[in-house]
Image (cartoon, coloured by chain):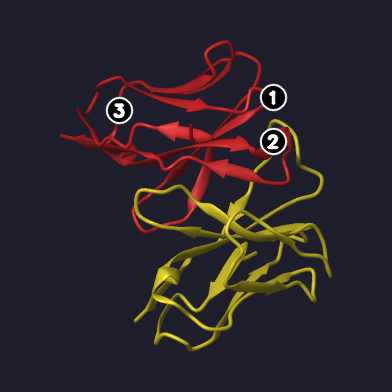
Chain colours: A yellow, B red
Amino acid sequence: NAGVTQTPKFRVLKTGQSMTLLCAQDMNHEYMYWYRQDPGMGLRLIHYSVGEGTTAKGEVPDGYNVSRLKKQNFLLGLESAAPSQTSVYFCASRSELAGGPTDTQYFGPGTRLTVL
Amino acid sequence: RKEVEQDPGPFNVPEGATVAFNCTYSNSASQSFFWYRQDCRKEPKLLMSVYSSGNEDGRFTAQLNRASQYISLLIRDSKLSDSATYLCVVPFSGGYNKLIFGAGTRLAVHP
């Protein structure tokens, strides 16, 4: 049981390049999330999904797209990378059965992205 | 006012000390709250959930003050392994589908 995994772990892009970050979870969770974390700021929600085939915008969605074609995978795409997208990206998932006081989001190990 | 505010620290304390962090939130409708722990260059992990007036788990106590809209985390008998950043987390607009994370309070426990 690997939990939440993310690939790649590190990536360096040039401005204007595109890439896709992959998040996979083996816990059969309905909800999945993409966050970015920058120094001095809390994790900010980019996009999220409440189930296979669904996606929704979070707090900072501009410049990113997502897809949830399979329940276990949540992809984050950068169509034309910009230096402002240099960040650490975390994926998280949680069970639909949660949603109460003991709700837990499980996080992947993160992807460190640098855009030059 | 930010939705969730925390003192960034760092809090530098000796082993065995008691240390407390506060977190203020702006959404008065929030019902439950969370403390996550994040080690350096690692992912956040749930430390404690906070509902009603508070919660206790071993050396860790979380308390909620709804009137003043803040939650606190108290760590007793600090260990070296407690060194980490502690994130205060509030559900977005009272729902659990999304969470709002504070920027975190850094704790450094020294021998």
Residue at 71 percent of width and 32 percent of height: B94
The residue that disc 3 covers is B78
Report the front residue among A72 and B67: B67
Residue B105 in percent (x, y) is at 36, 37
**In what element is the residue under mark 2?**
helix
Chain under callout 1: B
Q: Is residue B29 above or below residue B37?
A: above
Residue A28 in percent (x, y) is at 78, 61
Residue B89 in percent (x, y) is at 55, 37
Q: Amino acid at mark 2?
A: Ser
Q: Is residue B89 above or below residue A11?
A: above
Q: Counting residues from the N terminus, which is met first, the one under dot 3 or under dot 1? A: 1
Residue at 40 percent of width and 40 percent of height: B104
| Residue A63 found in image quarter | bottom right
Residue at 82 percent of width and 65 percent of height: A54
Q: Amino acid at mark 1?
A: Ala
**In what element is the residue under mark 1?**
loop
The residue that disc 2 covers is B93
Is the residue marked by circle 1 packed among few (<14), some (14-19), or many (20+) residues within 10 Å?
A: few
Name of the residue lying farthest toward the left: B111
Chain under callout 2: B
Residue at 82 percent of width and 61 percent of height: A51
**In what element is the residue under mark 3?**
loop
Q: Both on one chain, marks 2 and 3?
A: yes
Is the residue marked by circle 3 packed among few (<14), some (14-19), or many (20+) residues within 10 Å?
A: many
Q: Counting residues from the N terminus, which is met first, the one under dot 2 or under dot 1? A: 1
